[in-house]
Image (cartoon, helix red, strand yellow):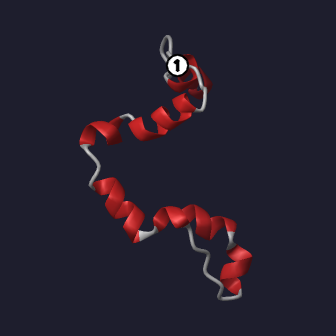
């Protein structure tokens, strides 16, 4: 919601409120009632993308090494 507010300032000034289909109460309730295993790894999304032809390397990338290391260097 905050992102929509930030990117639609002109509309908000004109008293036009943006609506996002991803924020509908019905969709949120649906997500809340999914089994926890499906929610943890975004299993439904990954399965759909796999059926569209994405490879496992793209769906489940292997992150090697310490991801925080480059950020630690930038801070120093």
Figure quadrant of the C terminus: top right
Position of 21 with respect to 24 (left or right) is right
Indicate the secondary structure of the residue bearing disc 1.
helix
From where the camera sits, is residue 1 visible? no
Q: Position of residue 28 (x, y in %)?
A: 38, 62
Q: Residue at x 60, y 32 (%)?
A: 52
Q: Residue at x 34, y 42 (%)?
A: 39
From where the camera sits, is residue 33 visible? yes
Position of 9 with respect to 57 (left or right) is right
Residue ranking furthest to the right: 10
Q: Residue at x 56, y 67 (%)?
A: 20
Q: Nearer the viewer, residue 28 or 44?
A: 44
Position of 68 with respect to 35 (left or right) is right
Q: Nearer the viewer, residue 35 or 8?
A: 35
Q: Position of residue 57 (x, y in %)?
A: 55, 17
Residue 19 falls in which quadrant of the image? bottom right
Q: Nearer the viewer, residue 4 or 41?
A: 41
Instruction: Name the residue that disc number 1 marks.
Output: 56
Judge whether 7 appears above or below 44 on screen: below
Residue 8 falls in which quadrant of the image? bottom right
- How many discs appear? 1
Residue ranking furthest to the front: 51
Q: Nearer the viewer, residue 5 or 56?
A: 56
Q: Residues within 10 Å of mark 1 (few under 14, many from 20)?
A: few
Q: Position of residue 21 (x, y in %)?
A: 53, 66
Residue ranking furthest to the bottom: 15
Q: Residue at x 52, y 19 (%)?
A: 56
Judge whether 18 appears above or below 42 on screen: below
Q: Position of residue 12 (x, y in %)?
A: 66, 81
């Amino acid at each position: 919601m905050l992102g929509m507010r930030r990117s639609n300032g002109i509309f908000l000034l004109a008293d036009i409120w943006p609506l996002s289909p991803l924020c509908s109460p019905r969709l949120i309730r649906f997500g809340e009632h999914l089994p926890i295993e499906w929610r943890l790894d975004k299993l439904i999304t990954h399965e759909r993308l796999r059926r569209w032809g994405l490879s496992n390397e793209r769906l489940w990338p292997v992150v090697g090494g310490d991801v925080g290391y480059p950020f630690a260097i930038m801070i120093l």
